[in-house]
Structures are given as C-alpha cells and as structure tokens.
Image (cartoon, rainbow, N blue to C red):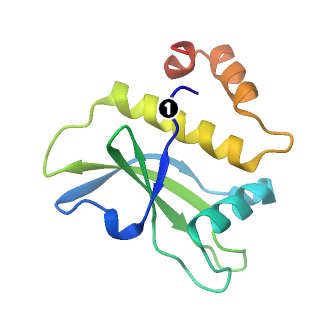
Amino acid sequence: MSTLPIVEPAQSRPAGHRGVPLLTEPSVGHYPEFRAFLARTFGLDADRIGGPGLLSVEGRFYELVFLGRSGTLFPSGVEIHALLPGLEPLDDDVADRDVWAVLGWLVDGVGGEWSAQYLATTGRIYRVPAAEQE
C-alpha cells in the first residue's frame, strides 16, 4: 500500500461536507480482531454506540460509520463514506484508490493471519484497479 490513512480526531471533520457511502461491511464479527482493532483505534466502548471514526488520505477525508445490531458486540459492521465539500462530485478513481488504502491499513492493523501483502495479491487476482496500480 503506497499511502497510509491517518486517524484524525472527530472534531477535525470538515464543516460543510457530506458523506457519500463507498463500502459497507455488515459483519466485522467474522474475524473478532477486526472489531477489536476498530474499537481500540477509535476508542469505541462495547456498551454503547460510538460516533464515526475519521481518516484522512492525502488530505481527503473519510468517515467510518460504525453499525450496531441487537445481540452483537459493537461495532457489528462498518461503512466507509467519502466526505465531499458541498455538492462536489465524487472522483471514482481517487475514491477507489483511497478505499483500497483504508483496507490495507485495516488489514495491517489487525495483523495476525491477515497482511496487506495478501490483500494486494487477492486484489490483483480479482483485478481490482487500485491493487494493480501498486
């Protein structure tokens, strides 16, 4: 992964920006380390619903919206939203590259059996454009 996302404080969310959903993972419980990494990184408390996490990639902002589901530990899932100023259009190519960087950051952060190298290999096998640019 060439560009790593930076975790930003929630109060750094840029004003006047709207969230554009890019990716949803409805169940992070399939691998408990994913949930643990998100909870640790963004200070989420398992007993309550937390606010969104904020990441920046080369000055562009992305919000991680944590999902809750009755009967499961929080967060049960996560959505990645691009934060765009006003009514600016989404640059699909940039968003795809940035989401790929976020996925690499997430996989590296989880560690263990998961690695960004394996993610990149999987991306090339499935011809994910952002993976092929590395």
Q: Secondary structure at mark 1?
A: loop
Kindly tell me whether residue 76 is visible in this rendering. Answer: no
At a point 25% along the width and 59% down the height, the residue shown is 14
Front residue of 67 and 83 = 83
Most extreme residue toward the right is 113
**Badge 1: residue crowd in 10 Å (few <14, some 14–19, many ≥20):** some
Q: Taking 93 as reference, is 121 left or right?
A: right
Q: Taking 19 as reference, is 57 left or right?
A: right
- Give amino acid for label 1: Thr
Residue 122 position within the rendered picture, expressed as x and y whole percent measured from the top left: 70, 23
Where is 39 relative to 89, above or below? Answer: below
Which residue was labeled with disc 1? Answer: 3
Which quadrant: the C terminus? top right
At a point 40% along the width and 68% down the height, the residue shown is 10
Badge count: 1
Which quadrant: the N terminus? top right
At a point 37% along the width and 37% down the height, the residue shown is 58
At a point 86% along the width and 40% down the height, the residue shown is 113
Residue 97 position within the rendered picture, expressed as x and y whole percent measured from the top left: 45, 28
